[in-house]
Amino acid sequence: MAGSPRRAAGRRLQLPLLCLLLQGATAILFAVFVRYDPDADAALWHWGNRSSSDNEFYFRYPSFQDVHVMVFVGFGFLMAFLQRYGFSSVAFTFLLAAFALQWATLVQGFFHSMHGGRIHVGVQSMINADFCAAAVLISFGAVLGKTGPVQLLLMALLEVLLFGLNEFVLLSVLGVKDAGGSMTIHTFGAYFGLALSRVLYRPQLEKSRHRQGSVYHSDLFAMIGTIFLWTFWPSFNSAPTMPGDGQHRTSLNTYYSLTASTLSTFALSALVGEHGRLDMPGGEGHTDSSLVSCPQPVLEAKFKVQDTCGVHNLHGMPGVLGALLGVLVAGLATHEAYGDGLGSVFPLVAGGRRSATAQAVFQLCGLLVTLTFASVGGGLGGLLLRLPFLGPPPDSQCFEDRIYWEVPGEREEEAQGSLGAEETDTRA
Amino acid sequence: MAGSPRRAAGRRLQLPLLCLLLQGATAILFAVFVRYDPDADAALWHWGNRSSSDNEFYFRYPSFQDVHVMVFVGFGFLMAFLQRYGFSSVAFTFLLAAFALQWATLVQGFFHSMHGGRIHVGVQSMINADFCAAAVLISFGAVLGKTGPVQLLLMALLEVLLFGLNEFVLLSVLGVKDAGGSMTIHTFGAYFGLALSRVLYRPQLEKSRHRQGSVYHSDLFAMIGTIFLWTFWPSFNSAPTMPGDGQHRTSLNTYYSLTASTLSTFALSALVGEHGRLDMPGGEGHTDSSLVSCPQPVLEAKFKVQDTCGVHNLHGMPGVLGALLGVLVAGLATHEAYGDGLGSVFPLVAGGRRSATAQAVFQLCGLLVTLTFASVGGGLGGLLLRLPFLGPPPDSQCFEDRIYWEVPGEREEEAQGSLGAEETDTRA
Amino acid sequence: MAGSPRRAAGRRLQLPLLCLLLQGATAILFAVFVRYDPDADAALWHWGNRSSSDNEFYFRYPSFQDVHVMVFVGFGFLMAFLQRYGFSSVAFTFLLAAFALQWATLVQGFFHSMHGGRIHVGVQSMINADFCAAAVLISFGAVLGKTGPVQLLLMALLEVLLFGLNEFVLLSVLGVKDAGGSMTIHTFGAYFGLALSRVLYRPQLEKSRHRQGSVYHSDLFAMIGTIFLWTFWPSFNSAPTMPGDGQHRTSLNTYYSLTASTLSTFALSALVGEHGRLDMPGGEGHTDSSLVSCPQPVLEAKFKVQDTCGVHNLHGMPGVLGALLGVLVAGLATHEAYGDGLGSVFPLVAGGRRSATAQAVFQLCGLLVTLTFASVGGGLGGLLLRLPFLGPPPDSQCFEDRIYWEVPGEREEEAQGSLGAEETDTRA
């Protein structure tokens, strides 16, 4: 993978040094800025003399754990469909999310919960950090197999920053309602990743085409991820909503929407599949997981965007549709439909400070802002990741665990030999 | 699979059309009949002015999520033990459950929670719908590998209806206590599936015998399902019981019963295994998972019932035993044993409207009603599924993913060729 | 595996008889001693007239279920990394934990919650029993692949007893705070297992060396275990702490500590890996999962301790470090840092009955007591397990499922033949 021994040694140190640098800086920032919020602080909570059952923890912790499983088990195994990239899919998910959780706590804290120069953390900040990590993992899906861990950490460093800024503009400046994270998570994560993938376009990627498919058991591992994501989605959507009826209603809506879309997806998959056969999510890039979908070959041929996991169909289009639905719902929000609950859904409309139509316009602005941040940010991220010393895998070694992992069952010399050979081939 | 191109094209449209038809009809019925219950309704909840922590959501949502994981991850992967049927096991579980959840909400709503012409849904209705889906998946286990998705959806359509009716008769008409769903879920699901499998009896099934076993890794996938089912069972049993001591006690009882039966199962498995060796659940049809078991070869030879997953031993016999235990417990129910808690377990006995003995008789009636509904219903279901145009897999192609799925790593022509050949063979 | 048919028949009965004996004895002890605690008892709870939301169940049940998943899914699959020992890893975890949960309920009950001659059980006793099972599974990791199920059950019988005694001495006699179970679970479990493994030292174990590695998919199964353990760790640590701010704060601390240690672990793994490549947990015995680690070859060469899962690095060293950190924290505990919450963390210091320095000394004593109990107990356990009639696997058949399981896809005669041959070889 390297031209000379010295460069190889230098590259070998990049990942550990970057990890230690990021972790060291994060630890210092935590020590200086981060404090417990009153529900988690021994002195403040006992001083407040409140009943244990009123602690925010009991309203949100079970949902938080479900979201946490989605991030680490769900995304990790969803991306394990590639036949020779299972280690990297699961473990880079792990690495990226572990960094993003800490960095997002700081970034979101600066933007949303800075009080007296301190960031206060509790179960809500854990949920919010996991949401930000989900967006990073969506972007990871677009470039899966074509980027190394150093590149991915730099991507996360930039993306979390822009995620926090975009979230701040939408929620705090524009007063937008973002149900299910349609805009801040799905749209932002998908188009950030796709813009980045566009900049990293590899015209010779078919050299790795034989590794880009799945095998029987790798698809079953991917099903573990898929089903955990699906099963816990009601928790994902209800975790951050208002306690009481808000969480209750959101989980119900998600539960029924998911079941309905499952039947529709099976219908579509059987219609478009050759010989009426169905496709597993994975193998062919999840083309079947969304009702409105742009075939990946088209995406690549027309727009030069190589989207490994099909995040355009899985998150991009659904995110945009969800956002547009939000515009519609805002425009129709009335006291009659929501009663006194309107305040918890659209507080500015309930308070008379904004008409329903104005809210709809602001919702639409939120979507445009998100698309702008995502595509410009992703483009900049792509330029950053093209820095030559970051050592991306060669075209012929994409989607291959062996360049990052000690893969069991392979003899060392063999691996070296074959990697070396293919590399020469690439540079030729 | 098809006699002529036209018939093949027709068959190709069956699954998508049925999915869209069922989903369309369900959506219309939801729009007309389904409303939020007061704990999930923004207007009603805020009008009631209650504390968030009293919302039913917090008493039941964590248990609901555990049950949801059992249905989708547990049942799905439990059935993935077959070497070439993992995609179908997981994905048809997904399809069937997604349909059953919606349809059960409607059917159970009509029977149990119709107020003012409307069905009110909340966390309890989600739990109940998941229970009904579990019964459907138990039945699926009996016919696993021998039925296509169109047949399975029709089975679910009928079974959910009868499940709702049986549940209504037991709980509302007979006033029966059905702890752990022994009767409504396990007994009903198992004997519905077995009766259906009896009607679909295939004397030539040994043509697919070589695919009916497991392989090393497919058994490990099945263990994922088994262990999630086992681990979350305390939640399954306690999810619908009375808040407070009721849920607490039920989860404890389940926890200790499961640990005790695990040791007994290992003992039995080692006793009956050849050379003292143990059997994995899966391979040999879970004969070891129940203490009282009827060997599957006997079931097939004597009763012509082909029971792929061994649901007779896993759910049928244990369900009947649980129901008989319920008869016994009801007969012994006294104020001394339960104190003021008797009202939450046997309200009719506590209220003096029924003697303990009478309650025991009603419990027994409940079991007989369940067995009747299940076997008659399953038999009718079998006749329905034998409609010739539904296209079941030929005897030689049972337990084979390739007829429904694009299996990775297989060349298209090859697959077609071999399927075609075997088909000819079948019809010969 | 046996010299003569009679011995073979005798050995064949050992496992079922031991299971039935242990289960029978446990059932009798439960019937005599175990009762519901007031929060789970129908009569007592309704008599108390308390609100359902105050039931202990709602403060702890979601965390309990997470811990339960860690024990059965997490530990079970974590140990499934061996290429030919997946069935045994998952199923012996199942067997050991199912026994340990019941036996721990009795032992911990005798030591901690005996009132009026009765043990009262509830959600807290379930959590405590799962913790004890976790310690047993940590010990299992040290001897994985080298011990049969009869040996393992005897190990659990002894270990649970000593675990309960050690826990009693630390928590009740010495008044020690054991955050995250550093001492009672991790240190005790690891050194009990390592001492036991030392006594069972096999100089000829390299005869099974070729089975001691992982294969690609077995490492992915191990990742399922690893990631569930990691994801639910905040629940593990917060499950037994004080309701309210205590659980909240503990989950936060665990969440951020884990993310920080993940980045550090990646850095270290990349630094020490050959060619800068990373190691999966599993294959090479988790040498990379702890920051302070003693290479396993050194452990074996110098101390004759064969540690299959690397529990020294995964649990032993981290447990000791955690305990030493606890000494430091105790020494610095002041009212200024904790406010009124000090009482829930170090009640003896808060109540003025002990100085912070004295508490630190007691913490250190706790660690020494734990190391003593673990190493002496593990040594005795090793002697017990060396009883010749317990039938351990021969050196050449370690790490092999086939001697305990009907492995799918193998013909009976073949298996017999090859096992017989290798056995002869061993005894030669």
Image: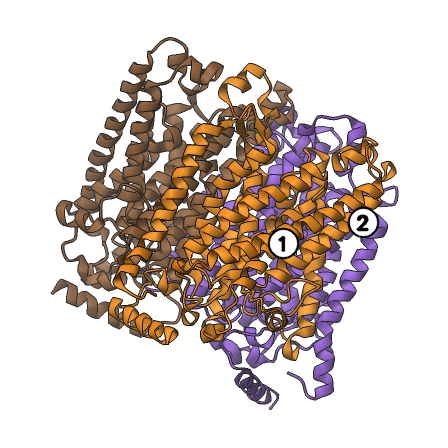
Chain colours: A brown, B orange, C purple
Q: Amino acid at mark 2?
A: Leu
Tell me, yes or no, if residue B224 can be seen here: no
Against A78, residue A246 (above or below) is above
Q: Please give the chain letter of the residue carrying mark 1.
A: C
Against C302, residue A241 (above or below) is above
Q: Position of residue C155 (x, y in %)?
A: 70, 65
Q: Quadrant of the N terminus of chain A?
A: bottom left
What's the mark number on residue C134?
A: 1
Question: Foreground mark, 1 or 2?
Answer: 2
Mark 2 lies on residue? B328
Element type at mark 1: helix
Q: Nearer the viewer, residue C32 or A89?
A: C32
Q: Quadrant of the C terminus of chain A?
A: bottom left
Element type at mark 2: helix
For the residues tagged 1 and 2, is the chain the same?
no
Q: Please give the chain letter of the residue carrying mark 2.
A: B
Number of residues whose C-alpha sits closer than 10 Å to that of mark 1, classed few (under 14), some (14–19) or many (20 or more): many
Q: Nearer the viewer, residue A223 or C118?
A: A223
C-alpha gap between disc 1 and disc 2 = 37 Å
Res B376 quadrant in image: bottom right
Q: Is residue A374 left or right of residue A178?
A: left
